[in-house]
Image (cartoon, rainbow, N blue to C red):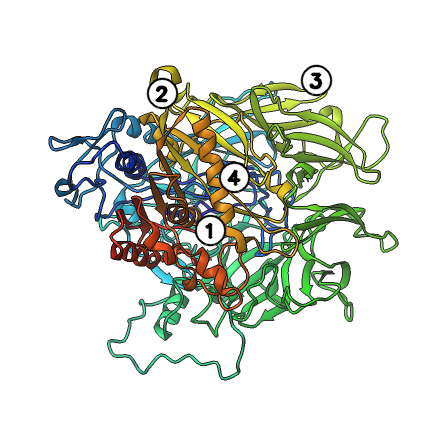
Amino acid sequence: MFIGFRCYHDAPWGIAPRIEPEHTVLAAPRLRLAASIVVEATQAFIAIGRPSLQPPEGLIVAARNQPSPSLSSSRPLQVLAAPCASARLRTRPAARPPVRDDHVLLEAPRLRHRRLGREGGGGDGAGPDAAAIGPGLGYYEDEGSALGGAYRLPPPEIRDIVDAPPLPALSFSPQRDKILFLKWRGLPPIAELARPEEKLAGIRIDGKCSTRSRILFYTGMGIHQLLPDGKLGPEKEVHGFPDGAQINFVTWSNDGRHLSFCIQFDEEDNSTSKLQLWVADVETGKARPLFESPEICLNAVFDNFVWIDYSTLVVCTIPLGRGELPKKPLVPCGPKIQSNEQKNVIQVETFQDLLKDDFDKDLFDYYARSQLLLVTLDGKAKEIGPPAVYTSIDPSPDGKYLLITSIHRPYSFVVPHGRFPKKVDLWTADGQFVRELCDLALAEDIPIAFNSVRNGMSSINWRADKPSTLYWVETQDGGDAKVEVSPRDIIYTQPAEPLEGEQPEILHKVDLRYGGVSWCDDSLALVYESWYKTRRTRTWVISPGSKDTNPRILFDRSSEDAYSDPGSPMLRITPAGTHIIAKVKKENGEGTYVLLNGRGATPEGNIPFLDLFEINTGSKERIWQSDKEKYFETVVALMSDQNDGDISLDRLKILTSKESKTENRQYCVISWPDKKACQITNFPHPYPQLASLQKEMILYQRKDGVQLTATLYLPPNYDPSKEGPLPCLVWAYPGEFKSKDAAGQVRGSPNEFAGIYPTSPLLCLARRFAILSGPTIPIIGEGEEEANDRYVEQLVASAEAAVDEVIRRGVAHPNKIAVGGHSYGAFMTANLLAHAPQLFCCGIARSGAYNRTLTPFGFQNEVRTLWEATNTYVEMSAFMSAHRIKKPILLIHGEEDDNSGTLPMQSDRFFNALKGHGSVKMHSKMITVRNGRCT
């Protein structure tokens, strides 16, 4: 189990360490240079927006027209399910996936529900030619000094927060008796982010080391024994690798005796070495290379390595005979031709980084093709299978078989690798071919409607509760969500090597779209299904080993209704390293009990809970709940699941994370029957200078009666009687709902720690700003109504309500309120300046898409095409209202943005449209930056 942070919005600074069978990933480092542009720009813009203040001639933000790094995540990090090795997440997640207790993605340093993202680098405002803007607004250099083209550092009060040492990530051994502390640096150098990368088939590859580009790493590891009294023993440092080693892909062996990981080094030409596989003995901490030959290097473009038993791994390596890099012909051999003579209907997103020609196809094969090696801990290795583009290797729970997934030609120029032809084979553990499970054709024609999927077999996986039993799902609607059919999906199961003539067995049928299975044993499994258009989600109880027991619905609810969420079943680890539903036995109690771990959404905010739930009767008992008065505490994992069999309630142990508005997150072990809590970490406050900041979850109403929420942050020791109303930054992200009731529900907790990551708008607190973070901007389409048909109307109404509330409270100056957002929030920002200019003095729009005609086959949650909803596309496009925007707007966009919905040209063209109408605007274009999927 691994605890830490990871950004969902494809991190612009790099790819987080791989989600391993026993743990998850931490948030990537970011550049402190990125911290100042929103802080400084907001202050400057607010000054510009004040009618009573005339800015000096030529006043601009220091970063105008110069490249600046920008790093962040814009989607909040959530407690999520991460799968075990035998049940990894596939491309079709459940509507509410079952909680995987072996590892978690915790809500990041953390501007909770709304997606807060990247800022760029700006000026520190210190210079002889700086012009004073006003009390509390800082200083800014004039235009001439701002165009020097150099990176700038933020002011000291911002720099101190950004440079705060990052907390280590934690990883628990499978036996729950040891904790691995993984240390990492906070900020990568710009040169590292600027390394060249190959953009092929929808991914970006570091060709020098055969892995994804900008991959993150750890700098050191320390092992602590978890003592019987719940405290930690002294640290045992993992040692033996050279200084400066960059560590990644850290994995426990299933017996907890070894760690496997990759290391690489920086080289003199600003590149990194190829990945080498190492192992460490947990008892001694001594690490060593696994392969005797330094010529054997990992290929981690897709999968990298996996344990199949306590002493054997399957490793993806660079083929030794790979040869020289293909050379692009100087003269093309002919024109690039695409045709649709078959008149196929192919509607695809505006995917980026696609293959462009035959040379790209060869280059993709060169980098992505791996040779699989079977290697034991003594370093003995043998090749298994031919070189191929292997995308995943999944061993059966008993270690006797391998489920091998690969992609092959013909490749496509219009879709990324995930839709290339895909082959799934079954091998023995020593590499002998058993049988082909499927060979799916190129999937260019998946419909754009939500819940549309690839036709054919999918989600092929191992049952977590059986030694070597496969299960998969097959669509009955051809993958097209618009086709009405019952059932829509059928789940099948079959032994790895069936008897002659033995056909797959139907496990269950669903009428919505299949969303996954949580296994327990032959008497119990939970099947999930959901349908986006209606927001309906259902959970079925089935008995896999009994054909006489009819499936029944356990939960049938709206996925939007947070208040009715019963929670997710907690899972336990098995000796094979898989994860199954944990059964609990009560003293002198009958029945089948499981633990439901819930967020506990209430009108007062989230109050997480743990319920003892009887599967057959539906009765439940709340055996633990977070303290709602001061703390926000959540259940992270079971700590008493080392042995087979049901867990006795009076011997239950759980791991929780606990925090408050002013206290950093700490981890505790709670033991039954007395529920005694023992804190096992003591992390310091990362920025004590903001320890006394004020945080409040506020409720207010939109004029149509919809209840809205937001989190209001005020600077430390703020006294309204002395300071009066403050400059205010409203940072938001719209969301779609099918009902007003769901849109008005409270999400999040007022007691969560105010985590501030290096590109967070909360940095403005250090400059005495008020921050309205994540005000709900619901776009509601009830019944048959499409939400976006009244997008502008509802957007403006929500913004008006938020602005009125902060003014009513006396914390925001009416003439000094700025609005900002990332991606779809940037789109929101531009629309608000166009349609509600009276509300805001300026705006900050980061990595947005402003012209919806450039995303004609849908965007965000809009599934209609441009030709089906022309008026909606045009009316929503801020680009079409560029002539209305007269307030200052700062556009920030990454030149390396790889998100399919936010091409960098969106900002370029919007900037030109604004300039063509003489609007006041500032356009800062970032380099070496990515967005991720939002719009």
Residue 448 x %, y %: 55, 64
Location of residue 902 (image quadrant): bottom left
Question: Who comes first in sequence, dot 2 or dot 1?
Answer: 2
Residue drawn at x 36%, y 49% is 214
Question: Who comes first in sequence, dot 3 or dot 4?
Answer: 3
Q: Is the residue marked by circle 1 packed among few (<14), some (14-19), or many (20+) residues within 10 Å?
A: many
Question: Who comes first in sequence, dot 4 or dot 2?
Answer: 2
Amino acid found under the numbered disc labelled 1: Cys
Which residue lies under the disc numbered 4? 776
- Vertical side of 887 occupied by 454: above or below: below
**Relative to residue 638, is residue 829 drawn left or right?**
left
Q: Mark 3 near mark 2, Cβ–Cβ under 8 Å?
A: no
Amino acid found under the numbered disc labelled 2: Gly
Which residue lies under the disc numbered 2? 724
Question: Who comes first in sequence, dot 3 or dot 1?
Answer: 3
User: Furthest residue to the right?
Assistant: 548
Amino acid found under the numbered disc labelled 3: Asp
Residue drawn at x 86%, y 26% is 588
Q: Is residue 703 visible?
A: yes
